[in-house]
Image (cartoon, rainbow, N blue to C red):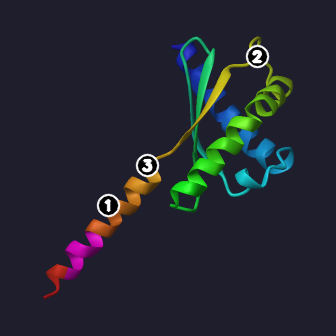
Amino acid sequence: MAQHFRVGRLSQEIQREVNDILLKRVRDPRVKDVTITGVEVSGDLQHATIYYSILSDKASDEKKVQTGLDKATSLIRGELGHRLSIYVTPEIKFERDKSVQYGDHINELLRKLHSTDKF
């Protein structure tokens, strides 16, 4: 049970710190408008998947952002190592958070349904 709380606490810490690192330390313009939406840490605290969202829906922008984040991964992991008080800094991987797009899709469907109900 205590391990579950530790994983959750570490996820929150990583999310807060990565947001701060992206704002203050990473100077790559490709990752300027990235928002960290969540972090999943493995049970053994060795791996962390960091989910992000961007405002653009263009595939080219998504690819640029992913490339920028991949380039900044070692810097971000190093900074996390300095900022977090844990024995081993987890390996990090960035993935686009699809839930934002899915939510927009659901909202659009609801709008269409609502507009057809008026007639």
Mark positioned earlier in the residue sequence (1 or 3): 3
How many dots with numbers? 3
Quote the CA–CA distance across marks 2 and 3.
30 Å
- 114 in magenta: yes
Mark positioned earlier in the residue sequence (1 or 2): 2
Residue toward you, 31 or 87: 31
Disc 3 residue type (three-letter): Ser
Disc 2 residue type (three-letter): Ile
User: Which residue lies at the image location 74% right of the left edge and 37% below the top edge?
Assistant: 71
Residues drawn in magenta: 110-115
Picture quarter containing residue 114? Answer: bottom left
Q: Which residue is mark 3?
A: 99
Q: Which residue is mark 1?
A: 106
> Which tag is nearer the camera, tag 2 or tag 3?
3
Q: Secondary structure at mark 2?
A: loop
- 63 in magenta: no
User: Which residue lies at the image location 77% right of the left edge and 55% below the top edge?
Assistant: 29
User: Which residue lies at the image location 66% right of the left edge and 42% below the top edge?
Assistant: 67
Quote the CA–CA distance across marks 1 and 2.
40 Å
Mark positioned earlier in the residue sequence (2 or 3): 2
> Which tag is nearer the camera, tag 1 or tag 2?
1
